[in-house]
Image (tube, rainbow, N blue to C red):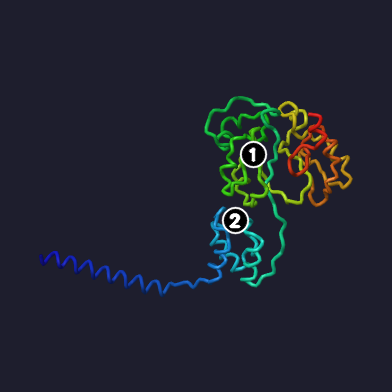
Amino acid sequence: MESVLTAVLTLGALAFAAGLLLSVAAKVFYVPVDPRVGQIGDLLPGANCGGCGFAGCLDLAGAIVSGQTPPNACRCASEEANRRIAALIGAVLKEREREVACIFCKGDAAHARLRFRYLGIADCRAAELVAGGDKACAYGCLGLGTCVNACIFGALRMGEDGLPVVNPDRCTACGACVRICPRRIPRLVPVSQKAIAFCSSHDPGKVVKEVCTVGCIACGLCKKVCPENAIEIVSLLAVVDPAKCTGCGKCFEKCPTGIIRPASGEAPARRQAAA
């Protein structure tokens, strides 16, 4: 009995000493935390999506307080939340245009050729590892919905044509879909952009025609008819400058494959009627 009592007293003394040591260490090594970090953290959405480049919302809050990043660094936060964050740190909020994700490929099953039938894991990253994917176009969407699964805001779904569809009202421009896609098919564009060449191919026109009927063939007709000089052919792909584009629609009418469209992604009325 005496040995049991000795063991209990010994363990109790050790526990007391350890607790005392931890208490002293906590006071000695205490790092004061600015209360604004917690207040800003409460204003952030708490999604920890990584779109800001930080590990989580609290890390971002600390960076905002320390001045490492602007108060509206969170793409998911509302305008009201950003204004309140700026007020907490006494900063002037610089307005930033909202962005949304767009799918830079229209090569669905009806328009894009396949090289083989992929039966592996339903993930675009896995499919890309199998001989570069099943699509004959090395730049086209693989259509397995990896970007859809990555979107924690429910802004993406797979369409009936096998391509992702973006709900702009739900998109927060967190960039998760952009980061996870092995072919960089989803990209962020400003909401004011009026025209987009919805293609990602950098192949010559002859090659594009062999694998996809709606790909950009870099013919340059869109560039020639644009009155604002808003279109350039960059690495065999038409690129629209949103700052110059007025949405006049001349490029829509001239594009032989119909890949330059309004930013909504819908085909121009003339082409819909012809179909």
- Image coordinates of residue 178 in percent, x first then y, are 63, 46
Tell me which amino acid carries mark 2.
Gly
Q: Which mark is residue 164?
A: 1
Q: Which residue is mark 2?
A: 53
Q: Earlier in the sequence, mark 1 or mark 2?
A: 2
Pick the front one: 84 or 203: 84
At label 2, counting other C-alpha atoms closer than 10 Å, the crowd grade (few under 14, some 14-19, many 20 or more) is few
Q: Residues within 10 Å of mark 1 (few under 14, many from 20)?
A: many
The residue under the point 68% across, 26% down is 113
Rendered image quadrant of residue 256: top right
Horizontal placement of 261 versus 115: left or right? right
Left or right for 134, reference 191: left
Q: CA distance from mark 1 to mark 2?
A: 25 Å
**Looking at the image, is 32 positioned above or below residue 262?**
below
**In the image, residue 147 lies at what x, y percent?**
60, 42
Which x, y percent locates residue 201?
Answer: 72, 36
- Secondary structure under tag 2 reads loop
The label on residue 228 is none
Vertical arrangement, residue 6 with respect to residue 115, above or below = below
Q: Where's residue 253, x and y in %? A: 85, 36
